[in-house]
Image: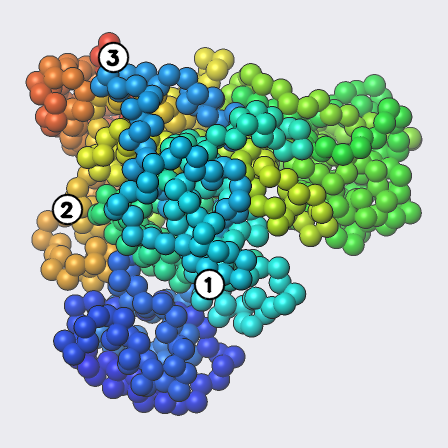
Amino acid sequence: MASASSFFVSLLLVLSLVSVTANRQTYIVHMKHQLKPSTFSTHHDWYLSSLQSLSSSPDSLLYSYDTAYHGFAAFLDPDQVESLRQSDAVLGVYEDTVYSLHTTRSPRFLGLDAEFGFWAGHSNQDLDQASHDVIIGVLDTGVWPESKSFDDSGMPEIPAKWRGTCDSGPDFSPTLCNKKLIGARFFSKGYRMASGSGGFSRKSKETESPRDFDGHGTHTASTAAGSHVANASLLGYASGIARGMATNARVATYKVCWKTGCFGSDILAGMDRAIQDGVDVLSMSLGGGTAPYYRDTIATGAFTAMEKGIVVSCSAGNSGPTKASLANVAPWIMTVGAGTLDRDFPAFAFLGNKKKVTGVSLYSGKGMGNKPVGLVYLKGTNGSSNLCLPGSLQPELVRGKVVLCDRGVNARVEKGAVVRDAGGVGMILGNTATSGEELVADSHLLPALTVGRKMGDVIRQYAKTDANPTALITFGGTVLNVRPSPVVAAFSSRGPNMVTPQILKPDLIGPGVNILAAWTEANGPTELEKDTRRTKFNIMSGTSMSCPHISGVAALLKAAHPDWSPSAIRSALMTTAYVVDNTKSLLRDASDGALSNPWAYGSGHVDPHKALSPGLIYDITTEEYVKFLCSLGYTIQHVQSIVKRPNITCFSKFKDPGELNYPSFSVLFGSKRIVQYTRELTNVGPARSLYNVAVTGPSTVGISVRPKRLLFRTVGEKKRYTVSFVAKRGVKQMGGPEFGSIVWGNARYQVRSPISFSWTQLMS
């Protein structure tokens, strides 16, 4: 086995060779932290000195990671990578991964504009005061600091625990930060290496600074903790008072996402810094595919954050309604899906056959007037005209007409720009089977609306069969109290969890459709270069929008219960979530209008009021997470690389990953018909609280809980229960999952855990 010193001796032979720059790229190197030679005072010195002395390229080292990760990011050629992989000091060498980026009504929809209710006798004012000490770190595209959402009027001095700062740049002065926006940093080395010198060329409007040229980061940061802003709207839509979830919390932004995406090396650097700076909540509306946790940079960094008491909230992804499409599924991460609000932006298409079609739109310019014009649908002309891809429309066919475009492939707003540039005067965007009946409103560049698949098919048939099809588009403004709501967004990524099927994900959903929040003034609301409009607020949709809602609510819980662990906060949010909409029906799915299930919404839709006082919680210690990791079949080095302690062993581990004390259940029936789990509940409600259990489940499974009653005599007391799941004989279940729940309740509290059941083979 090679020693730590020979690691760099062998590296010398490779790095001294002349490398072909074209073959070099960024790699993240996972190191055995404990093998640092004593001659170096810090790990950074170890990496930096060695790479500089051995390489003809002294700038090879991009980042050294000390907290979120043990190792460094470097610009290497294939031979150097291979040499590193042969070293005993190296746990792994991984290519830099590119991740993607996945409000006036939502606070009221969540009940945050009302008196918050019971919290051990405390008032809203007490919660506001406590929130001043909570810091939300947002890893995203940066911030537009001039936004009124970051106004610090009336805020007290910055908490003494804060160790962060504000970076300077060509367009960003540290003085732009204040008592609300207390930190703004940027991390661009991974992006710069991947994009070459053109990443920040003169032609690019983006500069190396914390400033947000995209808008996404400003939107998410203000959703989590934006200050109150009166008379906010997107060009007249959704007008009202804009505010974040935790209006009195502090915000620190870490720009890790750039024009071509978010690079893992930059994300890790941002997480590393945020943890050291002293954030209490990490909000990350970004993600990629799935991988084992030791290969997942976000999961590895989040483990350290969890250990230090930081709540990590991540978006689940926008790949729904496809099953098994989730990102960010580590059990120490809060995985957030998206649902709708009770607000809509109706628009109408009046067809020449007297049919009125209803859709949605945020178009705010000059309308079409009141005279119908010709309607065209160019399906089958050149293979892309029906999708309205750039260059696909012939002006002589669409000039002066409304064009019906199929949703898919390119951006929805880009389709409208293509129609406009070809001379069209309006657009109807018709959903296909992929997006179903989901309606996402857009601030189009011409009169346009989006309709669901069924209505889209009606219009397609009309356009194909009528000798002279016509259409007129009109707009209905903003409508409130829409029913049913919430509805699970069709785009929201779904389970099952493919990394650890025994852990049910997502954890819960929050508002993520048509969300109004602050926006950059460097970009139009459609984010198209052709969009010259500028607005201080924008309406966006995605799990990127639902994630900061949960981050902000988690900050409120952190303020109310500063001694609660991240697992306790997640448990409170999950066990108090609701699964019934405002029509008293079970939650439905926007993709087809049918009833949804926990693979889509997890525990349900967040309820901030109830989460503040959940009665009981499922807590998880670091040691239990280690036992969970050991149960996954990882090598001890893989476990150590996540936990970042060399003395970790797997002498004690779970027989089944599902034994983790998680607030939900995912039961897999395979070779065994009986699955049994024990959970532990902690009383965070009043002393002498008695709970009774209620169970629901499919007819194919028998469920028994022992004991059936739990009496908590003191606050903080812990009690265990065991639940047995038995797949009934004769059941032949190969396909779809089934679902149920376990509820511990009394007159005051209902502590609910969802259950999913899956069969991996025939049961005899």
Question: How far apart are the two marked residues, 2 and 3, measured between alpha carbons?
Answer: 32 Å
On the image, the x and y values in percent for residue 232 come to: 58, 30
Q: How many marks?
A: 3
Does residue 654 lie above or below 90 as drawn?
Answer: above
Is residue 382 left or right of 743 when viewed as pictured?
right
Which picture quadrant has residue 113? Answer: top left
Question: How far apart are the two marked residues, 1 and 3, measured between alpha carbons?
Answer: 50 Å
Q: Residues within 10 Å of mark 3 (few under 14, many from 20)?
A: few
Does residue 173 lie above or below 34 as drawn?
Answer: above
Disc 2 designates what residue? 623
Q: Name the residue nearer the viewer: 179 or 193.
A: 179
- Quadrant where the N terminus sits is bottom left
Disc 1 designates what residue? 188
- Quadrant where the C terminus sits is top left
The reply to whether dot 2 and dot 3 touch (C-beta < 8 Å) is no
User: Which kind of residue does numbered mark 1 sit on?
Assistant: Ser
On the image, the x and y values in percent for residue 662 come to: 24, 35
User: Which kind of residue does numbered mark 2 sit on?
Assistant: Glu
Does residue 34 lie above or below 284 as drawn?
Answer: below
Which picture quadrant has residue 755? Answer: top left
* N-terminal-most mark, 2 or 3: 2
Circle nearer the viewer, 1 or 3: 1
Circle nearer the viewer, 1 or 2: 1
Question: How far apart are the two marked residues, 1 and 2, measured between alpha carbons?
Answer: 35 Å
Which picture quadrant has residue 660? Answer: top left
Q: Name the residue: 61% across, 46% down.
A: 521
Q: Name the residue nearer the viewer: 178 or 111.
A: 178
Q: Does residue 434 show up? A: no
User: Which kind of residue does numbered mark 3 sit on?
Assistant: Arg
Disc 3 designates what residue? 748
